[in-house]
Amino acid sequence: MAENTEEALLKKEDEEEEARGARRRRQRHRREECPGCEIERLKETNRGVPYKLFFYVWIIVLCAALPISSLFPFLYFMIRDFKIAKREEDIGFYAGYVGSAFMFGRALTSVLWGMLADRYGRKPVILFGTVTVVVFNTLFGLSTNFWMAVSTRFLLGSLCGILGPMRAYASEVCRKEYQALAMSIISTSWGIGLVIGPAIGGYLAQPAEKFPNVFSEKSIFGRFPYFLPCLLISVFSLGVMVVACWLPESLHRHGESSEECDIPYEALEAEENKTLKDESQRNEKSCQTSWSLLRNWPLMSSIIVYCVFQLHDMAYTEIFSLWAISPWKFGGLSYSTADVGEVLALSGFGLLLFQLFLYPRVERICGPIVVSRVGAALSIILLSSYPFIAKLTGIILTILVDSASILKNVLAVSITTGLFLLQNRAVEQRGAANGLSLSAMSLFKAMGPAAGGSIFSWAQKRQNASFLPGNHMVFFILNVIEALGLLMTFKPFLTQPKD
């Protein structure tokens, strides 16, 4: 009887050992097949800058950024052609709602896209986003009425979830010492898209009027005067979609079930080295509920400050184009769409040079918070001069507007990059965290164009007011928002994450 019991125990032990061995083999196989682990191995063997992966990041983020603000130079004329505004002063009011539709749609779905990127991978979400840009940006260029324009912009924003996963991706494919450069590349690409997009819109809108020898009034570009810039951006996005097919995945995949996720590798294989132990800890953290993100104050405080600055930046983007195009009698510059495109193209070039060659060095010396504070303080001084610049004429006006636009965009993207870094250093669940950040930011950005357009329309009706007449009030309100963001970068509100 005792012998039978001993044999049964030995048999049970053999079965358990065989099960443990099988489990170890499955875990080893999963690590070998895991795309995230492959990225980790590449980071160990290649300790330099991953230029190829950074190129993917740059071009995909550019694809997502181009359509966001490409409409602003011609939006004033598009609303006028829709004949929905009863007075010229009311055009800014309706333009604000078209500008807000994209961000409102993105605010509703950004967290979902972040969760999907954490669940199924960064690459599928990115590919779907590029397809969305191709389809709905093209349809926006073919809009024939106000509501079609609003709906296509809303669908474009809600279905394009590229930015959040790309921010997570950029921090995952490089070593920590290059994360500042990675975030700078995202901010640079994003900033360039936000200024080159309007440049494309400004140069190529209404081609039948600007280039009658090339585009006739009876052609599709004559019947849809705002289709050409949208088509060009969609064609570019189609090319990016093809390039993104070679994008390597960075998400760790070691099994589907939460049970496996909770099993530490040390218990399965005693000889695991330190790298695999760290990997086990990452997997255990990825199993935590996303509610923990809301209790992460370094993350949440940086997101809130980031949202305030994004509200300001989006309102500024809307107001700048309306201010530049509006008649001189209303305090504007009386620029054409081509003039606005030229200003924004120069801004994009200056921004590219600063972010690639100066920002990483400045960030290493001063830190992201100091850079953001200095950028906000200088922005307040700069915006205070805009109403006075509008009183100038000729070459002096051109030089000052170009210089002010370059400086303003450089400062805005410097602030954004610093806050990007704080967010990514505060959490390891970067897909969900960036989705949360993007959702909150999109909500504030959705308010920016609507509020900016309404304020601009209201300010044009009070040219003779005794207190802050006309555009003085517009730029004063922008400065109040910027000052609020500046104050929030100090303790005890903003908390830096621990390394």
Image (cartoon, rainbow, N blue to C red):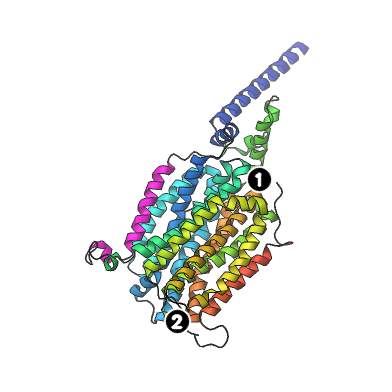
Q: Callout 2, which amino acid?
A: Phe
Q: Which residue, as the protein is rendered here, is positioned at the far front?
A: 395
Checking the image for residue 330, the label placed there is 2
Location of residue 312 (image quadrant)? bottom right
- Please say if 276 is above or below 326: above
Determine whether, in the image, residue 466 is placed left or right of residue 71.
right
Q: Main secondary structure of the magenta part?
A: helix
Magenta stretch: give its range: 216-245
Who is closer to the viewer here, 428 or 336? 336
Q: Is residue 233 magenta?
A: yes
Checking the image for residue 288, the label placed there is 1
Which quadrant of the rendered structure holds the N terminus? top right
For mark 1, give the secondary structure. loop
Where is residue 324? Give x, y as percent: 44, 72
Question: What residue is shown at x 41% (from left), y 54% (from top)?
Answer: 133
Q: Earlier in the sequence, mark 1 or mark 2?
A: 1
Where is residue 10? Give x, y as percent: 72, 16
Residue 343 in sight here: yes
